[in-house]
Image (cartoon, rainbow, N blue to C red):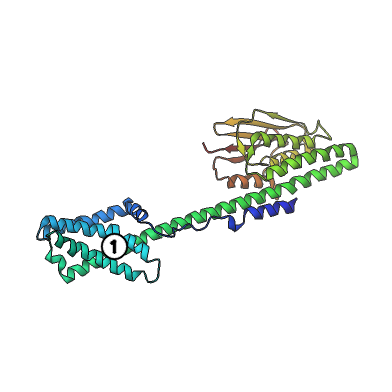
Amino acid sequence: MVRDRLEYVMDHASADRLPPDSSPAWPQPFDTWAALAHPRRALPILLVATPLIYGQSVWAAQPLGGAMSGLLLASGAALIAPPLWRLFTRWWWGPLPYALLGTGLTWMIAIGLPRLGAFADPFLAQPAAFAILTAATLVAGFLLGRDIDTERHLESKRRHLDALAQARDNAELLALRAQLDPHFLFNTLNAIAEWCATDPRVAERAILALSDVLRTVQRGARQTAWTLREELDLGRAVLDLHAIRDPERFASSLRGEAPDLRVPPLILLPLLENAVKHGPGAGHEGSIEIEVRPLDHGAVIEVSNPGPYAGRREGGQGLELVERRLALLGSGSSRLAMRGAEGRTYATLTLEESP
């Protein structure tokens, strides 16, 4: 059974189940424009474009034509050059067509369109001014396009790392469940071995009860969650199994109604094993009690046993298993607390779902 559980863990934690790196294969202009509209980019663009448009309206021979040319130049540098950069620089030869198209775009805006509109600006037609505008357009497209590509790449890597972390957590959770099967089995078989020597009929009843419990444990270990009612039914079956030989010594009770709540399977099993081992199993008289208290989006399950709480025991794994499983749930509201009071030990498990 352990081998089957480990194969199940490896199958569900395999790398080929992870989502691939989801970087866009072909950058779309709308994706670029949406990124440019973000205030982090839109505000600097506006800061640079405003003095350009104002300067053109002041220096140009025709103020209106100059303002229009400045607006077109700013728009071209901000809205057309970045998509061109993102498109062509996916190939090693991409910078050459990007530079040619960027130069042609600048010429059309700075010289071609003004001439067609009869507001030609001699200043923009000068080689030095045209070279400066062309360089500014190409650099603006490069900086904005590269910034967007870097952001998209980081987002894709972040999603992929999140998926890897989730797969790691799932694999660890499955491994923890795989540990629960032999842990519970070995403890129960040791008890049955004692019963075989003292009372074979009790041992026979225990083996049949153990078979039913293990079928339930096997079913729960293959699920990510089941109802709290199923978890409590398993807990009662485990306690009843221990009470087969000595009902008075291993008496137990359950108080409270289970709310409609899905919980991690087998989460109570280590707490019940500890309650049996360190309570009646250690010679302390009294019953093992389970109390359920509903919450708005969860429940509090308290397991108590006779015997004073002596703190965490070195080498104990039960409480650590529960806490590690709670940590893998990713909810800070779910927690385990241990305390002692009036000669009894209390394990309080709080399980909460996201509202």
Instruction: Let me know if residue 180 appears in the view.
Output: yes
Q: Which of 271 and 87 is in front in this view?
A: 87
Q: Can you tell which quarter of the image residue 92 is in?
A: bottom left
- Image x and y of residue 91, in percent: 40, 68
Q: Nearer the viewer, residue 271 or 219?
A: 219
Q: Is residue 237 above or below residue 86?
A: above
Residue 54 shown left or right of residue 145 in the figure: left
Q: Residue at x 28, y 58 (%)?
A: 78
Q: Which residue is drawn at 68% across and 35% down?
A: 230
Q: Can you tell which quarter of the image residue 154 is in?
A: bottom left
Tag count: 1
Name, please, the residue furthest toward the front: 116
Name, please, the residue furthest toward the left: 61
Q: Is residue 101 above or below residue 21?
A: below
Residue 323 shown left or right of residue 152 in the figure: right
Helix, strand or loop at mark 1: helix
- Image x and y of residue 231, in percent: 67, 37
Q: Can you tell which quarter of the image residue 18 is in?
A: bottom right
Q: Which residue is drawn at 80% across and 33% down?
A: 249
Q: Residues within 10 Å of mark 1 (few under 14, many from 20)?
A: many
Residue 215 shown left or right of residue 82 in the figure: right
- Image x and y of residue 80, in percent: 29, 59
Q: Which residue is drawn at 52% across and 53% down?
A: 162
Q: In this view, does 342 lie above or below 317?
A: above
Instruction: Let me know if residue 282 appears in the view.
Output: no
Residue at the spot of label 1? 140
Residue 153 shown left or right of residue 162 in the figure: left
Kind of residue sitting beneath label 1: Ala
Q: Which of 269 and 210 is in front in this view?
A: 210
- Image x and y of residue 211, in percent: 79, 41
